[in-house]
Amino acid sequence: MTIGFLVTVAVFLGLLFFLISEIRHPPRRSDSPWPKRLRLVRIVIFLIAGSLAVWAFFIEPNRLVTHYATIQIDQLPYKLSDLKIALLSDIHAGSAFIDEAKLRLIVERTNQLNPDLILIAGDFVAGDRGNTHRIEPEVFAPILKNLRASLGVYAVLGNHDWWYDAPKVRTALEANGIRVLDNEFTFVSSRGGPIFLVGLADLWEGQQRIQETIAKIPDGPPIIALTHNPDIFPELPKRVTLLLAGHTHGGQVRFPLIGTVVQSSRYGDRYASGHVVENGHHLFVTTGIGTSIVPVRFGVAPEIVLLTLRSASQ
């Protein structure tokens, strides 16, 4: 179902309502047609606005789409081409539309993509505002335990995880097979060759040790970095091939021509969502799955991202 379909239905219903009203109360010949026309316009506007509100507060936040993207990287060895990474973020378990059944659906949809690697960019827990009921880490972590990828499942923590209880969230995740990287890196041996995976602490709440952490990584294999907030992108050393992030929710509300209404980045829409290339560095920001503060999404569907990495020489 699309916004265009809803608008069409709204307009049709408005016209139908007006037609029925006209049949039941036909105007006298002496009456001016303008009051009736203005009445029709008011009805149509009301129905369109109502339909869009229903979409934004009840339909789009409850969707779950798969976003397929291919990133071509110059520094990527040819053998690592076609590495598939499932990227999740901002699950906000317990927020509107994110109950235990939805968590299981997220796991099922992600596993159906058969990714080589699953990365989760933080904000597992819901905030205090706009959530139906918070789902505790001891509940959502065993559900996420069922995520499957041949190279493993890794995560970083987001600002909401820190505001809640970061050590508790990390303990629950790692007890269920999801390794949390906080200014830490690990060596991943894929079928195409080795890569280093590094998790960088959240910009708002974590202790930023970007340069120090990257400096510890041996030379050689490409580096894929995972963090929550994409605003650290300009500070990354050149050695980092790709940064993956979430946090922004794509603005949650994005109007055609106008853009996002609320920006959670100090760079505005620059890192709001999708693939960004700057100074030879690659960034991909997912719009995430849950909602924050207000349970609304418009023009920004909740998503699971499947990234395919390609070598420029391919």
Image (cartoon, helix red, strand yellow):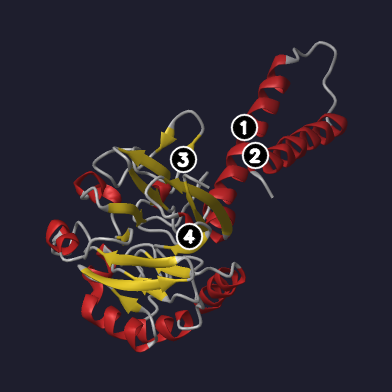
In the picture, measured across the screen, residue 129 lies left or right of residue 159, that is: right
What's the residue type where badge 3 is placed?
Arg
- Find the distance from the CA under tag 3 to the CA under tag 1: 20 Å
Mark 2, residue position:
47
Cβ–Cβ below 8 Å for labels 2 and 3? no
Q: Position of residue 90 (x, y in %)?
A: 39, 63
According to the image, label 1 marks what residue? 45
Question: In the rendered structure, are the residues bearing label 4 and label 1 in contact, judged by CB atoms less than 8 Å apart?
Answer: no
Looking at the rendered structure, the kind of residue marked 1 is Ile
Real-space CA distance between mark 2 and mark 3, rounded to the nearest whole angstrom: 21 Å
The residue located at (27%, 70%) in the rendering is 161
The amino acid marked with disc number 4 is Lys
Precedes in sequence: disc 3 or disc 1: 1
Q: Position of residue 125 (x, y in %)?
A: 35, 71
**Rendered image: mark on residue 79:** 4
Query: Quick check: marks 4 and 3 in contact, CB under 8 Å?
Result: no
Q: Earlier in the sequence, mark 2 or mark 3?
A: 2
Relative depth, front residue between 285 and 91: 285
